[in-house]
Amino acid sequence: MYEAEVMEFYSKVPVFSLSDLVQIISNRVYAKKFISRMIKKGKVKRIRNGLYTFHDDPFLIATFLLKPSYISTVSALSYYHKITQIPNEVFCFTSKPTKTYFFIERINFCNTKYFFGFEMKKYAGVEIPIATVEKAIIDSIGTVPLSVIDDSFEEVDVKRMISYLKVIRKSSIIKRVGFLLEENGYNVYQTLKKYINNKYIPLDPIAKSKGKRNSKWKLVI
């Protein structure tokens, strides 16, 4: 009873709650028993208390766990085939406090003041919010080692990247991204020069601060 109806409806939805299930099975007590039986059969997976899925893809379900959020940094760059390294965790950005879930692999939600620069993309038949390549690069700073995203600079939309940097207006981000763009052959210094302050900072905030000083971008390389 209800099994075929529930499976047909919720197999198309990445994540559903017990409250969602009660919309089909009007009795909450029976809904709990039903979901427990489905979990034992291996047809449904529990993400956490009261939250379930028919899927086993963390990338697919991630942005449905915490809203608003979007997939970014190496997870987005991997989606676009811009990096060779396959991430073993999912990175999302949110306007809400930082949070971590574990479903098959770690799903990280990083708080950001710059909640923009993403688009709805088709993945496994579902529309999910994923950062553009340019915003994924920006979000990667301080989140993952910059060496991981080296390949992603080969083809970027420089106008879009600069428009993002002008919205953000944060010198530390602009210096790092500007330097990496220049290293990859993009002439952006004159456009970004006015945003560069005189404080020296490490190119990679995750790496050590010792190294050669770059007086142009005020970075320790």
Image: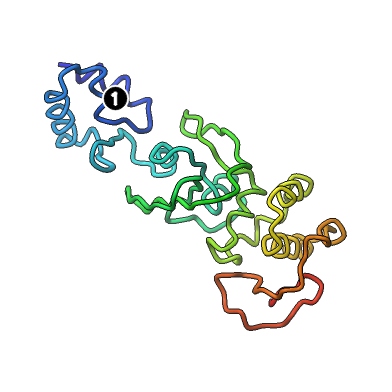
| Displayed quadrant of residue 30 | top left
Residue at figure coordinates x 76%, y 73% from the top left: 198
Q: Which quarter of the rendering shows the C terminus?
A: bottom right
Residue at figure coordinates x 64%, y 54% from the top left: 138
**Residue 184 horizontal/vertical position (percent):** 76, 61
SS for callout 1: helix
- Residue 18 located left or right of residue 1: right
Q: Residue furthest right?
A: 190
Residue at figure coordinates x 26%, y 43% from the top left: 48
| Displayed quadrant of residue 20 | top left
- By what rule are the colours in the image chosen? rainbow
- Residue 73 located left or right of residue 54: right
Q: Which quarter of the rendering shows the N terminus?
A: top left
**Residue 154 horizontal/vertical position (percent):** 72, 55
**Residue 214 horizontal/vertical position (percent):** 77, 77
Per the image, the residue denoted by label 1 is: 20
**Residue 21 horizontal/vertical position (percent):** 25, 24
